[in-house]
């Protein structure tokens, strides 16, 4: 289970936090680290804070944007400290870890952590199937980035040690994050074409549709059917 989990840090400003997060990951058996446009990396402070987890930093994948970091992932979870205008499925780290355990053995999970000061943007959170909120003290709920990674990593390790049976395998693998994004782009293109979506006043239509399809968790065959339907409609509009 743990070897199918990717920790993604977005636009981290302090290199020491990257090193401390790597240390938190290694103590719980996680090893796949992706860094989205870190401000300072590689950096001596990251190596110092990683202590004996420097190999995670050496193997870390550095990418320019979140979409690249989510490539091939079928389940995407974002950390969020506040409620959003449009509600999204939210759970605790423990509930999330149980969900991850139920994922098919050929599925890959990404867990996204945002910037130290501002977290993840609304747009970034819309790439996620699920949001995590750590139930910290409401009077002082501020966690350091590495502390948040440690809490999540701990719950994932506990879930991995649980020997209770998992659900049966599905007949087709789940659609990946990049496949979902191509579908959303295709869907938006068609909705504009039939004048259902007006970009001058889009409101929250695409956000709500994203939430709907992320909740549905389509597999790759279902995604192919949906894309085929969109293409057939477009062809008949010509």
Image: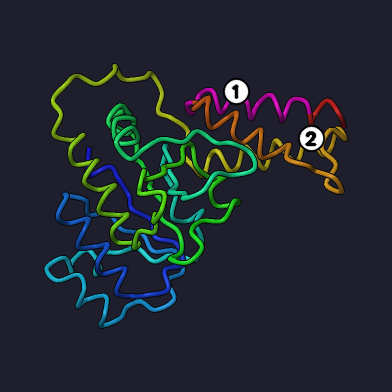
Under tag 2, what secondary structure? helix
Residue 233, horizontal then vertical, whole percent: 78, 26
Say above or below: 103 vs 86.
above
Looking at the image, which residue sits at the far front? 139
Picture quadrant where residue 163 is located = top left
In this view, the residue in front, 36 or 87, is 87
Vertical order, 142 against 236 (above or below):
below
Which is the main secondary structure of the residues drawn in magenta?
Answer: helix
Name which of mark 1 and mark 2 comes first in the sequence: 2
Residue at image coords 39%, 60%: 9
The picture quadrant where one finds residue 50 is bottom left
Packing grade of label 1 (10 A; few <14, some 14-19, many >=20) is few
Mark 2 crowd level (few <14, some 14–19, many ≥20, 10 Å Cα): some
Q: Image point 21% across, 73% down: which residue?
A: 49
The residue shown at (28%, 18%) is 167
| Image coloring type | rainbow
Provide residue 157's location: percent of width, then percent of height. 19, 41
Residue corresponding to mark 1: 225
Image position of 164 (left or right of 83) = left
**Highlighted magenta segment, given as a residue range:** 219-233
User: Any mark on residue 191, and which?
Assistant: 2
Q: Quadrant of the C terminus?
A: top right
- Left or right of 138 on screen, residue 192: right
Look at discs 1 and 2 and give the one toward the viewer: 2
* Residue 95 is a magenta residue: no
């Amino acid at each position: 289970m743990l070897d199918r989990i990717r920790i993604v840090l977005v636009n981290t400003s302090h290199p020491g936090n990257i090193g401390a997060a790597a240390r938190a990951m290694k103590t719980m058996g996680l090893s796949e680290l992706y860094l989205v446009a870190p401000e300072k990396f590689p950096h001596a402070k990251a190596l110092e804070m990683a202590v004996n987890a420097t190999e995670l930093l050496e193997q870390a994948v550095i990418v320019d944007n979140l979409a690249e970091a989510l490539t091939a992932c079928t389940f995407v979870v974002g950390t969020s400290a506040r409620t959003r205008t449009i509600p999204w499925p939210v759970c605790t780290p423990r509930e999330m870890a149980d969900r991850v355990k139920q994922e098919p053995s050929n599925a890959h999970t990404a867990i996204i952590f945002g910037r130290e000061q501002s977290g993840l943007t609304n747009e970034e959170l819309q790439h996620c199937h699920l949001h995590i909120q750590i139930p910290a003290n409401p009077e002082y709920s501020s966690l350091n980035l590495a502390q948040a990674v440690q809490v999540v990593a701990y719950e994932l390790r506990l879930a991995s040690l649980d020997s209770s049976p998992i659900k049966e395998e599905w007949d087709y693998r789940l659609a990946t994050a990049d496949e979902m994004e191509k579908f959303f782009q295709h869907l938006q293109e068609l909705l504009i074409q039939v004048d259902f979506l007006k970009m001058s006043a889009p409101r929250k239509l695409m956000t709500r549709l994203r939430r709907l399809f992320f909740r549905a968790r389509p597999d790759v065959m279902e995604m192919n059917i949906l894309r085929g339907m969109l293409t057939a409609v477009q062809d008949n509009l010509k």
